[in-house]
Amino acid sequence: MKTRKTGFVYWAPRVLGILMVLFVALFSFDVFDMDASLSERIGGFLIHNIPSFLLILLLVVSWRRELVGTVIYPLLGLTYSLANLDGHWSVHAAITGPLVLIGLLFLLSWREKQRTASAV
């Protein structure tokens, strides 16, 4: 029997993952303020979007395999914090906090999936 994928526990990490991709992608638009040719701006835009592309890939994999998201999202947040120790606390809260939260929500989603699978 196939269960419907509804509810906060299922959708919250996925929606927050999409919002995180969009948030990180916002920072790539600053390349259009620099004095450069159009091709250099587009190249810079693509390079600045590498983190967004990696987050998209992670979200695609985590969509069905919640344990991947449970492990990788918090590790990304921790890695970011350790790589930027001199950063302002608000930057850590804006980047690391949501990544850890998404990982925890994927854990809850995985546990819910396990619970419903064992009940059937």
Image: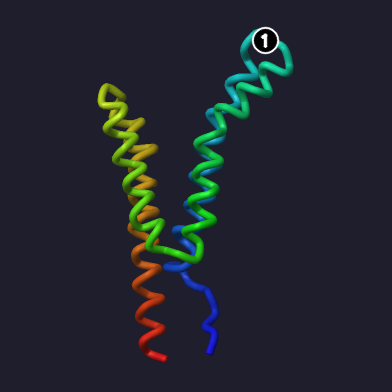
Label 1: few (<14), some (14–19) or many (≥20) C-alpha neighbours in 10 Å: few
Check disc 1 and report its element: helix, strand or loop: loop
Determine which quarter of the picture holds residue 116: bottom left
x, y (%) of residue 37? 72, 12
Where, quadrant-wise, is the C terminus in this rendering? bottom left
Tell me what residue is drawn at x 26 percent, y 26 percent.
85
Query: In this view of the protein, which residue sits in the foreground, 108 or 44?
Result: 44
Determine which quarter of the picture holds residue 68: bottom left
Tell me what residue is drawn at x 51 percent, y 42 percent.
54
Residue that carries the numbered disc 1 in the rendered image: 36
Tell me what residue is drawn at x 54 percent, y 79 percent.
4
x, y (%) of residue 90? 33, 31
Q: Is residue 51 left or right of residue 67?
A: right
Query: Looking at the picture, does residue 83 appear above or below residue 107?
Result: above
Query: Looking at the picture, does residue 70 appear above or below residue 48?
Result: below
The amino acid pointed to by label 1 is Ala
Query: Looking at the picture, does residue 90 appear above or below residue 112?
Result: above
Tell me what residue is drawn at x 61 percent, y 22 percent.
44
Q: How is the image coloured?
A: rainbow
x, y (%) of residue 102? 39, 53
